[in-house]
Amino acid sequence: MVSDFFEYAFLQHALIAGLIIGLVSPLVGIFLVVRRLSLIAEALSHITLSGVAAGLLLQKNFALFAGISPLYAGMSFAVLGSVFVEQIRQFYRSYQELAIPILLSGGIAVGVVLIGLGNGFGVDISGLLFGNILAINKQDLWLIGVVAVLVICFILFLFKELFALAFDEEHAVLSGIRGKWIHLLFMIMVAMVISVAIRVVGILLVSALMTLPVATSMQLSLSFRKTAMFSILFAEFSILAGLIFAYWLDIASGGAIVLVSIALLVIVISGKRIYSMVQYRKANVRGES
Amino acid sequence: MGNVLLQMEDVSYSYHHQIVLENVTLSVEEGQFLGIVGPNGSGKSTLLKIALGVLQPKKGKVWLFGSPMKDQKQNYNIGYVSQKSNSFQRDFPATVQEVVAAGLASKKGILRRYMKKDYLLVDEVLEQVGIQDLRKRNIGQLSGGQQQRVFIARALISKPKLLILDEPTVGIDRDSTKQFYDLLNYLHKQHGLTLIMVTHDIGVVSSLVDQVACLNKKLYFHGTRSLFVEKEKELLSKAYNHDVQVIDHHH
Ligand SMILES: Nc1ncnc2c1ncn2[C@@H]1O[C@H](COP(=O)(O)OP(=O)(O)OP(=O)(O)O)[C@@H](O)[C@H]1O
Ligand SMILES: [Mg+2]
């Protein structure tokens, strides 16, 4: 298997893409989770689907678009969708999640209609839905790299503002932080991460990659910084292990990655249970003697 | 007479059609401790939000630190502890240190990271509020009183000239409340901090603060504590028995 890796460029592409996605997904995901907006990722991924479908339609009908990856159209749709999410969030201050079902169903509906118009395009729909990391080419890799650099810079430079806003938006805005702008930019970053991450895990599973590793590391009750670092660690592990399983057993990479993430969550939760049970026993024994 | 930090003149405010503040004129001088009392729904929190610049008065003028409200760009000269400051998610992954440091975020400015000296500042304010040993603990694992101290520390870390507290002792036990008031008294007396505090605790008003405002849509009283104590019965019955009426104003 190791020799395969050095021999085939597509395996190297897959690994590099996977590791980059494993870094940026939980990095934006942690802010979504603590702001209770996890499902936004889900909604935006559905919008990306309709964008990709639109891109495919353009590709099929206009020579001009023939060489352009439909991923760009997907990304444009996701970014527009993210701006829309922020607008709706402003309208319904205390029911912020209302934006989600609107976009979720809207995105799927448009996507289905466009795919229907293109008679299915004869493209790899299941690759779109579940990810096909082994099909990543150089062009995709560049796009993923550029997005990653943008997102990492954004999060690192605005980390303290993002944290202050996530913990207590009212107080942060009061103290002079430009919450509206930062949230808008953040949503755009989320949209970009999603539109590249779907190459790896697919539209249906992309939000899992953003939230599951975060959910797992939140179980450890660490500081915010450490929670972020452990989320990245869990995500990278899931991706590596998932890719190995996928290649080995010849199964879809997205499914394998998400299953490993879930396994990690279960292990951490049961580990915590067992640990506290042991502590409790110890305390009792000490109490009796 | 000291500097006037906050000045409101003829301020009125309404949500939709409901008038909640009517012609309130009030000033707070540097070094004063103002207690605001009044029944539920009497507009106390609204008044504070106007002082903070979150809400714009529908009528009247507000000056802060000597200049009109509109000209205030940055608010880190005011520390604020809101009425529901401990309503965050209980398992939010953050330590006391991180939460308190967040109070510095705006003052430091964009693109700047926290440095060693910022964390020393965190230690300093945690010591001031008496919880330096909780620095590394997760915020969700603290008791209500301890959390309240964290939020005071977050408000204090930017070295504000004015500290605004909206019912800071709700849900806190008697001993912690007493310690908390001792802390406010210390900040007021030793550091000369100017404070505005909304409270339902009339006992505290008549012992801790030096100025009292009694509010129920209109300002029923604004004066020194001793004057308030003298007329307390009469004032309170007037302010509290006057039902909070819903008055429509037609456009
Ligand atoms: N965001 C809002 N939208 C509409 N009406 C509001 C809003 N906030 C407050 N009000 C109304 O304004 C009035 C004054 O509210 P405010 O919160 O200022 O009272 P308060 O004196 O702080 O009361 P409490 O002692 O219960 O905290 C109340 O009648 C309330 O219903
Ligand atoms: Mg109030």
Image (spheres, helix red, strand yellow):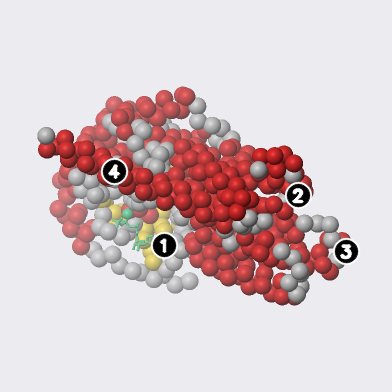
Report the Cα–Cα distance between label 4 and label 2: 47 Å
A243 displayed left or right of A12: left
The chain containing the residue under callout 1 comes to B
Q: Is residue B155 visible?
A: no
Judging from the image, what secondary structure is the residue with disc 3 in? helix
| Residue at (59% x, 37% y) in the render | A157
Report the Cα–Cα distance between label 1 and label 3: 60 Å
A153 up-or-down from A49: above or below: above
Where is residue A181 shown, x and y percent of the image? 59, 49
Report the Cα–Cα distance between label 2 and label 3: 21 Å
Mark 4 touches mark 3? (CB < 8 Å): no
Label 3 environment density (alpha carbons within 10 Å; few <14, some 14–19, many ≥20): few
Q: Nearer the viewer, residue B220 or B166?
A: B166
The answer as to whether the residues below labels 1 and 3 share one chain is no
Mark toward the viewer: 1 or 4: 4
* Mark 2, residue position: A137
Amino acid, disc 1: Ser
* Mark 4, residue position: A276
Label 2 environment density (alpha carbons within 10 Å; few <14, some 14–19, many ≥20): some
Mark toward the viewer: 1 or 2: 2
* Mark 3, residue position: A63
Where is residue B159 shown, x and y percent of the image? 41, 31
* Mark 1, residue position: B14
